[in-house]
Image: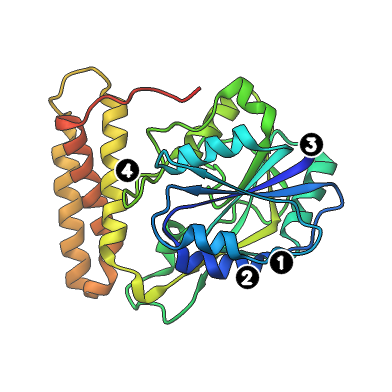
């Protein structure tokens, strides 16, 4: 049986967050066209399977729960692509709350523009007190995103949608492939970039990617669990992955200019600390972590195996 839309939710060992997400899902206004909810349990070892089995789904909803044992968000998303019955697949994360109009906003975009792919706005929702060191400039690293205030085409490689709120016509995977399994979170490994890589392949193939600020997701943040090390680790892994890809099978001797960039990044942290204190230094510390990861990846990282098909 086919339908217009598959809403896909991938989850791994987030039982505590998943409970809130499942409780909030019935607030979504269903689209006019037929749709289904597809949940991929990605090798969870906590209470996730029991929570999903016992959850009371709203009357009239079509819900399927499948298990993907191969760990990794990209693997879970690729399983969703394989199993989806919808013409369009729309992804939501397991720690998010959608605005009631979220799905209908995407439906309006699809009816008006027939996009190949699309993304929507993400707001950060703190569930408790926000740390003093968490400045506004860092919220994007927690998923906050609003590319444009109006519906518009996304045309530039640097203006991708985010993985917490996006979708695409399922058939585009026949042209650009699926998600790269070398990228994306794998358990406690925060390596990301799979949705950016996918987005750039969409653009390279000449496909139309649209943005709508009307489809809003709230990314819930437990501020008491936030740690500066999360941001540093995120940038370390980003630098390492980018270095491995850029170096490829070339020389493992890092470019000389990296030494100067690394030194300037360290100096910037010191100047910021002296001027404004420790609470103001994290953004510049993240630059240092990026260069440490970049140098490490260039020296010791394996060449990536390539893009998923």
Name the foreground residue: 196 vs 262.
196
Where 95 falls versus 205 (above or below)? Answer: below
Helix, strand or loop at disc 2? helix
In this view, the mark in front (3 or 2): 3
Q: Are marks 2 and 4 in contact (CB under 8 Å)?
A: no
Question: From mark 2 to mark 4, how far is it between C-alphas?
Answer: 33 Å
Q: Are marks 1 and 2 in contact (CB under 8 Å)?
A: yes
Question: From mark 1 to mark 2, how far is it between C-alphas?
Answer: 7 Å
Residue 147: where, in percent of width, then height?
59, 51
Mark 1 or mark 4, which has the lower sequence index? 1
Residue 270: where, in percent of width, then height?
15, 63
Seen as rendered, the residue at the extreme right is 32
In this view, the mark in front (3 or 1): 3
Question: From mark 3 to mark 2, how far is it between C-alphas?
Answer: 27 Å
Residue 50 seen: yes
Residue under label 4: 238
The label shown at residue 1 is: 3
Residue occupying image coordinates x 27% and y 53%: 233
Residue occupying image coordinates x 32% and y 52%: 188
Q: Is 246 on the left-hand or right-hand side of 56?
A: left
Residue under label 2: 23
Q: Is 3 on the left-hand or right-hand side of 227?
A: right
Residue occupying image coordinates x 26% and y 51%: 287
Where 258 falls versus 29 (above or below)? Answer: above
Residue under label 1: 26
Where 217 falls versus 236 (above or below)? Answer: below
Name the foreground residue: 71 vs 158.
71
Question: From mark 1 to mark 4, how far is it between C-alphas?
Answer: 36 Å
Helix, strand or loop at disc 4? helix
Residue 234: where, in percent of width, then height?
32, 51
């Amino acid at each position: 049986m086919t339908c217009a839309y598959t809403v896909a939710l991938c989850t791994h060992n987030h039982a505590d967050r998943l409970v809130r997400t499942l409780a909030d899902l019935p607030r979504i206004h269903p689209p006019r066209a037929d749709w289904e909810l597809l949940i991929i349990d990605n090798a969870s070892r906590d209470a996730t399977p029991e929570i999903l089995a016992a959850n009371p789904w709203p009357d009239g909803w079509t819900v399927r729960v499948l298990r993907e044992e191969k760990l990794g968000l990209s693997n879970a998303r690729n399983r969703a692509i394989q199993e989806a019955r919808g013409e369009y697949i729309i992804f939501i994360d397991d720690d998010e709350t959608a605005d009631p109009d979220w799905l209908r906003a995407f439906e309006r975009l699809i009816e008006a523009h027939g996009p190949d792919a699309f993304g929507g706005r993400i707001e950060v929702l703190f569930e408790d007190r926000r740390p003093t060191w968490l400045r506004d400039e860092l919220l994007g690293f927690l998923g906050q995103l609003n590319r444009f205030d109006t519906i518009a085409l996304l045309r530039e490689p640097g203006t991708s949608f985010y993985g917490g709120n996006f979708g695409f016509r399922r058939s585009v995977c026949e042209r650009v492939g699926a998600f790269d399994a070398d990228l994306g979170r794998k358990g406690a490994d925060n390596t990301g970039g799979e949705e950016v890589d996918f987005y750039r392949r969409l653009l390279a193939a000449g496909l139309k990617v649209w943005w709508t600020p009307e489809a809003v997701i709230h990314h819930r943040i437990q501020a008491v669990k936030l740690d500066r090390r999360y941001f540093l680790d995120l940038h370390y892994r980003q630098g390492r992955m980018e270095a491995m890809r850029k170096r490829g099978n070339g020389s493992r001797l890092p470019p000389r200019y990296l030494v100067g960039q690394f030194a300037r990044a360290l100096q910037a942290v010191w100047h910021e600390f002296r001027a404004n204190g420790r609470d103001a230094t994290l953004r510049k510390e993240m630059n240092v972590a990026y260069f440490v990861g970049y140098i490490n990846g260039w020296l010791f990282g394996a060449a990536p195996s390539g893009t998923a098909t």
